[in-house]
Amino acid sequence: MEEDFITDITVDLKSDRLNDDVALFMSCTLQELLVVIGLSLLMGMLLGLVMMKIVVGSFVWGLPVGIFLFFIIFFVLVVRLSKLKRDKPAGYYKQYLLIRLSKLGLFKLPYVMRTGRWSTQRRVN
């Protein structure tokens, strides 16, 4: 009788139950990490190459310095992103980024952004 009870229990561990992406490193998902890696690699290499061209006069030393700067910039960006995401709902930082880009005039928001007093009355002007 006890064996029937134990065999009747099934565990439903389907991946379609997950609503959000899985956090891989410091609460960042794979897509976020790829974006951060791309940005930090671009910034690190550009800064390293330009800095070594100015200081030494050659681009050769720019690669090792760029790789070193890549790691510094990567960890700074990941820490800032994880602090931005802390205790916020999923998708918060994307909405935050869109609002910041719209304030700079680089993107048109799909949201209603209005400051001021809202009225519930109907008016015909």
Image: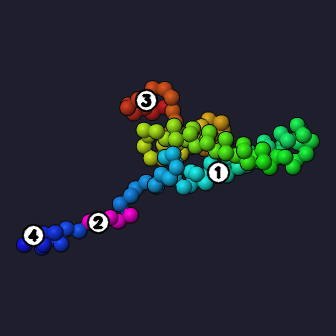
The residues tagged by marks 3 and 1 sit, at their Cα atoms, a distance apart of 43 Å
Tags 1 and 2 in contact by the CB under 8 Å rule? no
Q: Secondary structure at mark 4?
A: helix
Residue identifier under label 2: 12
How crowded is the residue under tag 3: few (<14 C-alpha within 10 Å), some, or many (20+)? Answer: few
The three-letter amino acid code for the residue at tag 4 is Glu
Q: Secondary structure at mark 2?
A: loop
What label does residue 37 carry, if any?
1
| Residue visible at 61% across and 42% down in the picture | 75
Q: Residue furthest right?
A: 57
Q: How many marks?
A: 4
How crowded is the residue under tag 4: few (<14 C-alpha within 10 Å), some, or many (20+)? Answer: few
Q: Position of residue 7 (x, y in %)?
A: 18, 72
Question: In terms of depth relative to the viewer, which is nearer, 93 or 74?
Answer: 74
Mark 1 and mark 4 lie on one chain; the one further toward the N terminus is 4
The label nearer to you, 3 versus 2, is 2
The label nearer to you, 1 versus 4, is 4
Question: In terms of depth relative to the viewer, which is nearer, 89 or 122?
Answer: 89
The three-letter amino acid code for the residue at tag 3 is Trp
How crowded is the residue under tag 2: few (<14 C-alpha within 10 Å), some, or many (20+)? Answer: few
Mark 2 and mark 4 lie on one chain; the one further toward the N terminus is 4
What label does residue 2 carry, if any?
4
Look at the picture and state if 70 lies above or below 15.
above
Q: Secondary structure at mark 3?
A: loop
How crowded is the residue under tag 1: few (<14 C-alpha within 10 Å), some, or many (20+)? Answer: some
Does residue 99 appear in the picture of this structure?
A: no
The label nearer to you, 3 versus 1, is 1
